[in-house]
Image (cartoon, grey):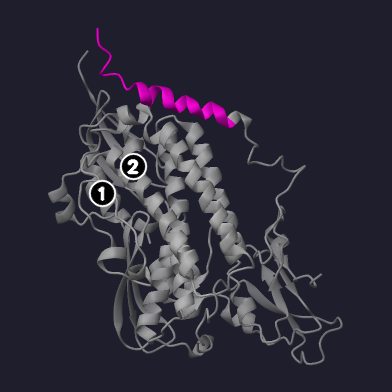
């Protein structure tokens, strides 16, 4: 009786997977543990109202029409003659960062916060927070 | 009992289908008598969406044409715009782009390994490979700010410079992946289950492959050495040393071995990029403002070697800030229809997922 047709190596070698048991797991126990978001991550927008000039460049470049310029009454940059600031619709935004690229005073940026859950579509309309 | 022809739909919601598409199968017992590919579940009309956006706006759409591997799309788009607008990019930006392409290729091959191992019940390997892919995505997150859609390769260069210590971390990841490859050999590529299931299955004839325009592993898996990075070099690929892995079998196993060889070559290329990349230099050329960025009345075809084969873009400008016409030529159209439908005839039902995965079919790219 010969066993030359049996792929002994191909049958035995996969059992080396057992060695992985002794290694540290690559996953984390969410939500007890969370992964740190990298600096520069493209999360929700922040807008520095002291710097925003209400120019609407961000609205113009947005390819998803996700940005509306909305009139505000609160304290703002004196150069903001339009009295408008951007409001983002996160049902449409694709976090491409183009609005940040074209912002002349660099008031708009993408922060590291990225988790939001809400039942209604109107809950996805955000005024960007002030940067921390 | 008399054998009856039974028609079933394999997909669109089936773990063995590569994305949102389905294959209509006429079965005689377990054997496939006829196969017909159905798409249309994912049509978003990328090409038309792009024609209604300015050059700068359109850039954010192209990465969505292939979810597992968006970077060849960004590269094609950027190179087509640069070609039409006459923009030269810096040497440092070219090296960064090669780095992004090869990281993307590695991530795509690891994702493929996850799908292929799952299709034959070797789930452990899939979990490992997806974890290793996640380590690459971690680096993409640091580099681009996004894990899957990077939106990083931009006409004129790249959008951000490398973060502090990025090349060192990339080198450490390559060390880790090099240690993992022999482990994947033992558990996947040399596994008797894979060999038994994949050798002699889904065989492609080399003459047919050339005549029908198959690309990537479908071509290299039947002994034809074709790779755009070597045949028609772009960026700085002509300054880098790498081999084109080729196997003669033409079957699913040969295509798997080609992919395995390509992972090793990508690691080799990335090591050279780390060593050769200029430490300083511009990463982005000065570009016109949003509404002033126009393309001349001209057209161009550019192509990039993706992890699944040649990926080409035809682009035409008309003197305005809009792209007059853009057409995507990816590997999935020919592989998903002409090749898949003929390869499945005579095969067992259980081999459908195996063959589909080996061809790297990606439905969004068919329905662009």
Judging from the image, mark 1 belongs to the subunit labelled B
Indicate left or right for B203 with B100 as reference: left
Disc 1 packing (10 Å; few <14; some 14–19; many ≥20): many
Residue B147 at least partly seen:
no
Q: Give the magenta range.
A: A1-20
How many numbered dots are placed on residues in this image? 2
- Left or right: A131 with respect to B170? right
- The quarter of the image holding the C terminus of chain A is bottom right
When asked about the image quadrant of residue B192, the answer is top left
Dominant SS of magenta comes to helix
Q: Identify the residue position indicated by label 2 in the image.
A: B256
Q: Is residue A17 above or below residue B152?
A: above
**Viewer can see residue A91:** yes
Q: Which mark is residue B246?
A: 1
Residue B276: x and y in percent read: 46, 69
Q: What secondary structure is marked by label 2?
A: helix
Q: Does the magenta-highlighted stretch encompass residue B16?
A: no
Relative to residue B214, is residue B161 drawn left or right? right
Of residues B125 and B61, the one drawn nearer to the viewer in this rendering = B125
Image quadrant of residue B334?
Answer: bottom left
Q: Residue furthest front?
A: B275
The one of B235 and A120 positioned closer to us in this rendering: B235
């Amino acid at each position: 009786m010969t066993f030359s047709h049996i792929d002994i190596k191909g049958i035995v070698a996969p059992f080396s997977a057992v060695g992985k048991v002794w290694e540290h797991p690559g996953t984390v126990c969410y939500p007890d543990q969370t992964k740190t978001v990298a600096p520069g991550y493209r999360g929700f927008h922040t807008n520095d109202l002291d710097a925003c000039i209400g120019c609407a460049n961000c609205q113009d470049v947005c390819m998803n029409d996700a940005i509306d310029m909305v009139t505000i009454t609160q304290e703002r940059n004196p150069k903001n003659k339009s009295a408008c600031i951007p409001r983002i619709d996160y049902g449409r935004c694709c976090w491409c960062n183009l609005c940040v690229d074209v912002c002349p005073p660099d008031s708009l940026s993408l922060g590291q916060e990225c988790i939001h859950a809400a039942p209604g579509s109107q809950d996805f309309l955000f005024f960007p927070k002030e940067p921390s | 009992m008399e054998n009856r022809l039974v028609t079933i739909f394999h997909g669109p919601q089936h773990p063995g289908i590569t994305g949102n598409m389905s294959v209509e199968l006429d079965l005689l017992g377990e054997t496939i008598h006829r196969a017909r590919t159905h798409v249309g579940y994912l049509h978003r009309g990328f090409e038309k969406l792009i024609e209604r956006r300015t050059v700068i706006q359109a850039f954010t759409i192209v990465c969505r044409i292939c979810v597992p591997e968006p970077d060849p799309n960004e590269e094609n788009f950027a190179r087509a715009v640069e070609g039409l607008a006459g923009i030269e990019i810096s040497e440092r930006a070219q090296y960064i782009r090669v780095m992004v392409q090869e990281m993307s290729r590695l991530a795509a091959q690891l994702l493929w390994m996850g799908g292929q191992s799952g299709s034959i019940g070797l789930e452990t390997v899939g979990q490992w490979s997806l974890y290793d892919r996640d380590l690459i995505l971690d680096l993409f997150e640091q580099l681009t700010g996004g894990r899957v859609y990077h939106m990083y390769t931009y006409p004129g260069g790249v959008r951000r410079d490398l973060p502090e210590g990025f090349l060192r971390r990339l080198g450490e990841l390559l060390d880790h992946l090099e240690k993992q490859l022999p482990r994947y050999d033992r558990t996947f590529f040399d596994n008797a289950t894979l060999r038994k299931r994949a050798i002699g299955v889904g065989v492609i004839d080399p003459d047919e492959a050339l005549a029908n325009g198959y690309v990537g592993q479908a071509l290299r898996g039947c002994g034809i050495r074709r790779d755009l990075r070597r045949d028609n070099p772009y960026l700085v690929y002509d300054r880098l040393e790498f081999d084109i892995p080729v196997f003669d079998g033409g079957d699913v196993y040969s295509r798997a071995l080609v992919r395995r060889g390509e992972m090793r070559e990508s690691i080799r290329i990335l090591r050279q990029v780390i060593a050769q990349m200029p430490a300083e230099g511009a990463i982005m050329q000065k570009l016109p403002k949003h509404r002033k960025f126009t393309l001349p009345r001209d057209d161009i075809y550019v192509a990039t070697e993706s992890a699944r084969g040649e990926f080409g873009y035809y682009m035409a400008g008309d003197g305005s800030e809009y792209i007059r016409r853009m057409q995507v030529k990816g590997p999935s159209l020919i592989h998903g229809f002409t090749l898949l439908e003929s390869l499945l005839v005579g095969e067992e039902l259980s081999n459908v997922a195996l063959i589909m995965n080996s061809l790297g079919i990606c439905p969004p790219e068919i329905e662009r």
